[in-house]
Image (cartoon, rainbow, N blue to C red):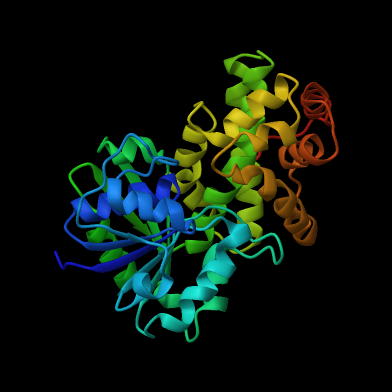
């Protein structure tokens, strides 16, 4: 395996876990953090005490807030930033990156301002970036479990099979199994939209509605994710894979999921403002519910679960009323997607 020079732009829980994974796999890794104090502290103690406090980073990882130091000479750039911040962070790095660097998106969501997928944002920001040199990493991965070297599988989405295979080799370890998929559109839509369904699934849990309800919600959620993805050029079969049903099931069934936890707390009567103010990491499903509705309206795609979550999150609709409205919808024939 070729030893790669990699920079991870973003020191949240998943960025830190990914840096740990790559370093233990023998690669030269730099972890760039937005917060200078946290970067200095993590470089000294080898522990990201805010986002991943139970994991000690290998001494080989350089942790820094200096963007020029972080990206200089790197052959692979991995963007971890939440959609609302990714463009600004990558704009800092873009002038410092060589033209032949490979760009990888590892965030999940749609950019609020443009409704673009994150690989499209990378294509906008990095000069000369070709779609064939951009990839997305997605799948069912809780950072805490990956950093503890528990078995997991992911998918590398890239139009260029050679690029996907190179990243697959780079990421592969005895406990971390990457697959490849040339449908980068589907990979990104699956990873983005599942967070909205996870909020709804948390509401089902918080209201005590049972596992029948949760199974039905996950299944119908997958249907509307597939509809919007297909309307934007994704292959429906992609949503049967790791970035689709795999990530959806994980995020919709565990308190480790920030989005699921938001739904549980909403069902318990807490306000969105109070829930979000108490979180150290971003629950992307909140913002994505707004962008997904805008995109669905543009594409004339029906997304009833997403619509109800938007109304709960931004129009103060009671969670129980959202469930009632979903059940009162006109009867229809089930479709494959």
Q: Is residue 217 visible?
A: no
Q: Is residue 245 left or right of residue 264?
A: left
Q: Choose top left, top right, bottom left or bottom right for residue 319.
A: top right
- Residue plotted at (80% across, 56% down): 297
**Picture layout, residue 224 above or below residue 203:** below
Q: Position of residue 219 (x, y in %)?
A: 59, 33
- Residues 5 and 291: in front is 5
Dividing the image into 4 quarters, which one contains the C terminus? Answer: top right
Q: Choose top left, top right, bottom left or bottom right for residue 124.
A: bottom right
- Residues 268 and 245: in front is 268
**Picture layout, residue 240 above or below residue 125:** above
Q: Is residue 83 left or right of residue 176?
A: right
Q: Position of residue 101 (x, y in %)?
A: 35, 78
- Residue plotted at (34% across, 66% down): 7
**Picture layout, residue 76 above or below residue 37:** below
Q: Position of residue 72 (x, y in %)?
A: 33, 77
- Residue plotted at (14% across, 64% down): 1
Q: Is residue 265 visible?
A: yes
- Residue plotted at (25% across, 38% down): 149
- Residues 44 and 287: in front is 44
Q: Position of residue 179 (x, y in %)?
A: 32, 53
Q: Choose top left, top right, bottom left or bottom right for residue 77.
A: bottom left
How many numbered marks have been drawn onto this rendered protein structure?
Answer: 0
């Amino acid at each position: 395996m070729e030893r790669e020079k990699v920079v991870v732009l973003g020191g949240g829980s998943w960025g830190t876990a990914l840096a740990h994974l790559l370093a233990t796999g023998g690669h030269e890794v730099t972890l760039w953090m937005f917060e200078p104090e946290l970067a200095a502290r993590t470089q000294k103690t080898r522990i990201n005490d805010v986002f991943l406090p139970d994991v000690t980073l290998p001494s080989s990882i350089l942790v820094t807030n200096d963007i020029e130091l972080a990206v200089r000479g790197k052959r692979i750039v991995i963007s971890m930033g939440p959609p609302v911040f990714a463009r600004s962070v990558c704009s800092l790095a873009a002038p410092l990156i060589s033209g032949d660097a490979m760009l990888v998106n590892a965030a999940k969501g749609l950019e609020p301002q443009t409704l673009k997928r994150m690989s499209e944002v990378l294509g906008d920001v990095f000069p000369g970036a070709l779609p064939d040199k951009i990839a997305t990493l997605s799948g069912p991965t809780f950072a805490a479990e990956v950093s503890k070297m528990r078995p997991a599988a992911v998918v590398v989405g890239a139009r260029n099979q050679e690029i996907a295979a190179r990243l697959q080799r780079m990421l592969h370890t005895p406990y971390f199994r990457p697959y490849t998929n040339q449908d980068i559109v589907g990979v990104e839509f699956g990873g983005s939209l599942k967070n909205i369904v996870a909020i709804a699934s948390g509401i089902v849990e918080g209201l005590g509605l049972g596992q029948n309800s949760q199974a039905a919600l996950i299944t119908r959620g997958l249907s509307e994710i597939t509809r919007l993805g297909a309307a934007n050029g994704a292959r429906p079969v992609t949503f049967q894979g790791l970035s689709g049903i795999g990530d959806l099931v994980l995020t919709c069934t565990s308190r480790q999921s920030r989005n699921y936890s938001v739904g549980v707390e909403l069902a318990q009567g807490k306000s969105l403002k109070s829930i979000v103010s108490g979180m150290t990491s971003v629950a992307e499903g909140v913002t994505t519910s707004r962008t997904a509705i805008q995109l669905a309206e543009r594409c004339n795609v029906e997304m009833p679960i997403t619509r109800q979550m938007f109304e709960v999150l931004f129009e103060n609709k009671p969670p129980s009323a959202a469930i009632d409205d979903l059940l009162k919808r006109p009867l229809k024939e089930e479709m494959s997607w």
